[in-house]
Amino acid sequence: MWLKLLVYQAVVPYLANVFRDLKGIEMQTPLLEKLSILADSAKYDVSCSSSGGKRKNEGKGLGNAEGMGICHSYTEDGRCVSLLKILLTNFCIFDCAYCVSRKSNDVKRAAFTVQEVVDLTINFYRRNYIEGLFLSSGIFKNADYTMERLVRVAKKLRQEHKFNGYIHLKTIPGASEELVKEAGLYADRLSVNIELPTEESLQALAPEKNFKEVLTPMGHIKDQLVLVKEEKKLFKSTPSFAPAGQSTQLIVGATAESDRQILTLADGLYQNFQLKRVYYSGYVPVVTDSRLPIISTPPIIRENRLYQADWLVRLYGFGVNELLDEQNPQLDLQIDPKLAWALRNRHVFPLEINTADYEMILRVPGVGIKSAKKIVSARRFAPLTWEHLRQIGVVLKRAKYFITCGGRSLETREWDEEAIRRKIIFGEKGSRASLWGSQLDLFQQAS
Amino acid sequence: MYFYSYDGSFDGLLTVVFEAFERKAWPTQIGKEGEAPPGIFATHHFVPTQEDKANRVWDGLGKKLSAAARENVYKAFLWEQPGFEMLIFQFVRLVFTSAQQGVEENFTQPCVQKMAAVGKQMFREKHRMEAFVRFQRSQDGLYVAPINPDFNVLPLVVPHFEKRYADQHWLIYDVRRQYGAYYDLEQVHLITLEEAPPSLRKGQLSPDILTAVEPLYQQLWQAYFDHVNIPERKNPKLHLRHLPKRYWKYLTEKKPRIQAHQPIQNKQVPTAVPRLKA
């Protein structure tokens, strides 16, 4: 195996040291340091979902991955820690501008052995630290070589250790269909990162990657998911294939695309590739590169608005074109996308909460899926009052401008769009606060 | 005014409900044996637990409620907050006196709302314990986790851990309520330690009890926790909302560092390395 690597050195001379040392590093670097390096470089992959699995613990093995995921901890930035999320190695032959592990970055490198990842996973799992493993990798040698090792980890966990916990494997762009198929036998979820919202951006920032190499394995996964689902109807014994489906991630704010472009892409991916989730990762400047924007803080609010819009499209029955259009290609950063839609569509409101359809109640700002369901079931027993709505969990601060209850409104006068927006952002006694806010804006413009 | 007392068991409380219906004497308060009656004018009944009567109430609830809604009645019992007995009584009375089906969804009734809210609180605490239990491996191969939940959720989390850790011995011990669930590869036993080691209460078992590699794995987990954090996105408010301080004592990753965190440096592209053209 190492002989082949030596041949490869001739092609990429400055990786020579890297590969000569690869085996040595696997052995020498203490486990603690390896884990530090390889967790640090995996953390920009935002998914940490462990839900949607169907793996039961039959025959007294170790672990299960059924139904709802569990966040075992939360980082200081408030993100869920559900899985042991690591790279197999951060050695990489690619030089993607946004990536901390790009080959031209002078970062400490390390590589786990297959057995080390297996041991860490099992020992963390037994202590109830994690729901399972999320394994990704820098690309060493080529796509299939890397993919094969990822698959080997998963296979070993499943077959030798009877491990039924959650496994999420990153599919390396350009990996062969056979390996993707095998990965799906052991993994609960597979994901291929689309990385950036357009092919042009990908070309500019990650010249070694292209959409085709991403979409091809995504297509293989989808086909296999559909096929296995069909076969399962006929033969219950058909082996599962990635029962928690596939997902992808793209970086937001490193390139100039609008929210409309991003959500249109996501919507297309949901429909054409049956993705479970599209993850939006606000760009964190980890490397300096003239092709990248200079920002002081990651676009966290924008990222949050994109997730809100994504949920509205997937679960609330909104179309992307209702939330964004040519005139409004960006989501409003001050207010959530549902409120923004409601303010633009005042002709739909007010809704009478005791008679309106469930689908319409879902569209009221301040009403979530659970509240909407409770409203519909509770009003069968008695006409609902404002107090009932409050107890059910409706956020009246936002909802009150859009609903009536028993024909009555909580507001004694009609407010225009601007006034409602102001009141919701700055509170009831909003005029002064809003003045203060606009002054702040002036300061910001001046500085 | 009627004050009913019972032995503190769930079956006992259900027997009280049965007796109250039989006597048509609705309680103004229900309390554990030995609790003082609410006032000198209250008629006091002590109700001894009778399993058959408790079962009749439980089965009756099964006919009128969904499985989840009936489970909520038990959760309200484990909730243990002041007034939980009367809440259960009011809810059960509403269920038995209501002609309509699906009364559990009648959120216009305050006790239905309250039961749903309690159910939610209990679910959240149960879910937190499923997440925040941290096992430490002892020398004899027992995985031990001290817990101190806000509500008495240990009985609710047992099935989860039984399914998940079917091939290891484990003990989850509620240090405040002083009882635990011990799994011996066959089944779970509820136990009380006669002499709980003081280090159990403190959340960190002493090294002489632990297996040799245990500190290493605790250290690895701490290092992992430190390195998955993205400092540029620091958000202490959100962190605290998800991970309230009262749980920290039992969380390996929030305990004092075995080895200080050293951030990985090197984020600039060094000039010596050739760069690809844009």
Image (tube, coloured by chain):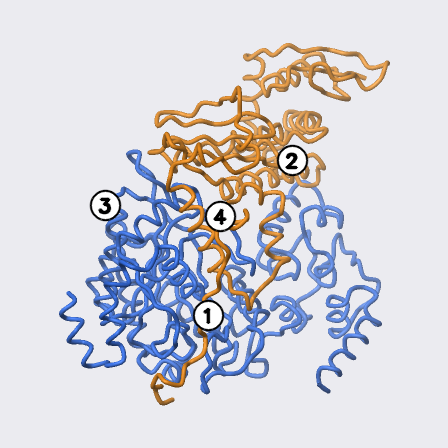
Color of chain A here?
A: blue
Foreground label between 4 and 1: 1
- Identity, as a three-letter code, of the amino acid under mark 4: His
B142 and A254: which is toward the camera: B142
The label on residue B194 is: none
Query: How busy is the neighbourhood of tag 1: few (under 14 within 10 Å), some, or many (20 plus)?
Result: few
* Residue on which disc 3 sits: A159
Query: Mark 2 is on which residue type?
Result: Met
Q: What is the chain letter for disc 2?
A: B
Residue occupied by mark 1: B265
- The quadrant of the picture occupied by the C terminus of chain A is bottom right
Residue B115 badge: 2
Q: Residue at x 52, y 76 (%)?
A: A259
Judged from the image, the secondary structure of the residue bearing numbered disc 4 is loop
Does residue B146 lie above or below A303 as drawn?
above
Look at the numbered disc 3 and give the secondary structure of its residue.
helix
Amino acid at the residue labelled 1: Gln
Q: Image quarter for residue A206?
A: bottom left
- Label 4, on which residue? A72
Question: Which is more foreground, mark 1 or mark 2?
Answer: 1
Please tell me if label 1 and label 2 are on a single chain: yes
Residues at marks 4 and 1, CA–CA distance in whole angstroms:
27 Å
| Mark 1 element type | loop
Find chain B in the image and tell me its colour. Answer: orange
